[in-house]
Image: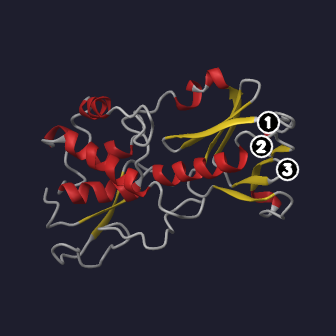
Amino acid sequence: MPEGDAVYRTARRLSQALDGRVLTRSDFRVPRHATADLTGRTVLETVSRGKHLLTRVEGGLTVHTHLRMDGSWRVTPAGRPGAPGDQIRLVLANEEWQATGVKLGMVDLLRTEQEARVVGHLGPDLLGADWDPAEAVRRLAAHPDTTIGEALLDQRNLAGIGTIYRAETLFLRGVHPWRAVGAIDDLDGLVSLARRLLDANKDHAGTVTTGDRRPGFQTWIYGRAGRPCRRCSTRIRRGEMGAQPQERLILWCGHCQPR
């Protein structure tokens, strides 16, 4: 599943291609919206909210999409052949650009005034204009017995962290993933670091897809399972956190992140 910074960049790329332009084509390839047609409407803006994408269209409508694990948005010049048809979930195009949603995990069309139906449950957005660190800390602290590793991935606490920034944040703070939230002395510092990490990477050039394939992007711990820790040379450990089938990859250094 993509990190919040990757979704932020996707929103920006969609915004550059679609915002302020009239749609000449809209093709929803999901059963519940198969008959919807936004042709002739102007795209007002595209924004990210955590890991969700909201494309607001003239007439009080919002296209809500989520990449999940395998989805992506591909922006190409209008008229250029896209991905195989059975992978496409949505096409939005104007006279200059075509945005093709491939393997999207969620596709919704709803009234803009009803966006809370799909994103209202989210905690403060780490890359949002309304970022509220105090509220993020309050939400985390409300469940002191939860492991910090699980709490950071719960988008109801703070929106935008995935497995990469969870691992990086906990490593840099020296916090073991299975430590209980209530046992952490400085939640403010941990949340502040997570925000800084995402913010520092949100403008890094990269592809508008899931995953982290950015050239030159170096991590302290993520993707280094079994390799020496960059700090102490202890072998990086890997495991899974969360209840099945929602368990997710976690990496940590047993020396730098003691229990």
Label located before the other in sequence (3 or 1)? 1
Mark 3 crowdedness (10 Å alpha carbons): few <14, some 14-19, many ≥20: some
Q: Is residue 75 above or below residue 235?
A: above
Give the residue number, with chain letter if any, for mark 1: 33
Q: Residue 246 placed where, x, y %?
A: 45, 49
Q: Earlier in the sequence, mark 3 or mark 2?
A: 2
Image-quadrant location for residue 135: top left
Q: CA distance from mark 3 to mark 1?
A: 23 Å
Which amino acid lies under the numbered mark 3 shown in the image of this protein? Answer: Glu
- Residue 221 in the image: state x and y as whole percent: 30, 67
- Asked whether, in this view, residue 187 is left or right of residue 90, the answer is left
Tag 1: residue type? His
C-beta proximity under 8 Å, tags 2 and 1: yes
115 or 204: which is nearer to us?
Answer: 204
Secondary element under disc 2, as helix, strand or loop, is loop
Taking depth in this image into account, of 199 and 121 the one nearest to the observer is: 199
- Work out whether 14 lies above or below 214: above
Residue receiving disc 3: 95
Mark 3 or mark 2: which is in front?
3
Name the secondary structure under disc 3. loop
Count every numbered label the image shows and give the total.
Answer: 3
CB within 8 Å, label 3 to label 1: no
In percent of the image, x 26 and y 34: which residue is there?
137
Q: Compute the Cα span from label 3 to label 2.
A: 24 Å
Q: Find residue 30 and name its label.
A: 2
Graded by Cα atoms within 10 Å as few (under 14), some (14 to 19) or many (20 or more), the crowding at tag 2 reads some
Residue found 53% across the figure and 50% down from its top: 7
Asked if residue 107 shows in the view, the reply is yes
Q: Which residue: 31% across, 58% down?
A: 167
- Mark 2 to mark 1 CA distance (whole Å): 6 Å
